[in-house]
Image: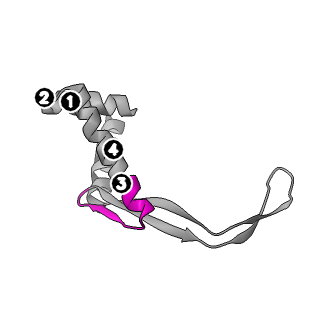
């Protein structure tokens, strides 16, 4: 599913135009990115939480050449699904498998 598909579904479900819906979704995504850039976490109950994790500097290995490579300290965004979200996906997939 692409962002355009999400815009179509949300617009159909809300009665908003696709242009309005796209602006809302873009605004949401920009807000998430800006909050994470500032080191803030975001929690959406029943959906999940976005956080930023610090990865320490380390020595790694290039799997193609076997050469040792230095990887500097960096930060990565993470997402953890809520328990409710996981249960809904699991039950939906189990029902799909039974068909």
- The residue singled out by tag 4 in the image is 94
Q: CA distance from mark 2 to mark 1?
A: 6 Å
Please say if 1 is above or below 47.
Answer: above
Q: At 33% from the left edge and 52% from the top edge, which residue is drawn?
A: 31
- The residue singled out by tag 2 in the image is 15
State which tag comes first along the sequence, 3 or 4.
3
State which tag comes first along the sequence, 3 or 2.
2
Q: Magenta segment, which residues?
A: 32-46
Secondary structure beneath disc 4? Answer: helix
Q: Marks 2 and 1: CB-CB under 8 Å?
A: yes
Indicate how the structure is coloured in the image: one colour
Nearer to us in this view, 85 or 72: 72
Secondary structure beneath disc 1? Answer: helix
State which tag comes first along the sequence, 1 or 3.
1
In which quarter of the view is residue 43 placed?
Answer: bottom left
In which quarter of the view is residue 97 placed?
Answer: top left
């Amino acid at each position: 599913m692409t962002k355009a598909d999400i815009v179509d579904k949300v617009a159909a479900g809300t009665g908003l135009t696709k242009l309005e819906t796209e602006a809302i979704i873009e605004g949401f995504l920009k807000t998430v990115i800006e909050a994470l850039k500032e080191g803030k976490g975001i929690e959406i109950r029943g959906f999940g939480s976005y956080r930023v994790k610090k990865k320490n500097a380390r020595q790694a290995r290039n799997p193609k050449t076997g050469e040792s490579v230095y990887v500097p300290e960096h930060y990565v965004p993470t997402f953890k699904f809520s328990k409710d979200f996981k249960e809904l996906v699991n039950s939906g997939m189990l029902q799909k498998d039974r068909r």
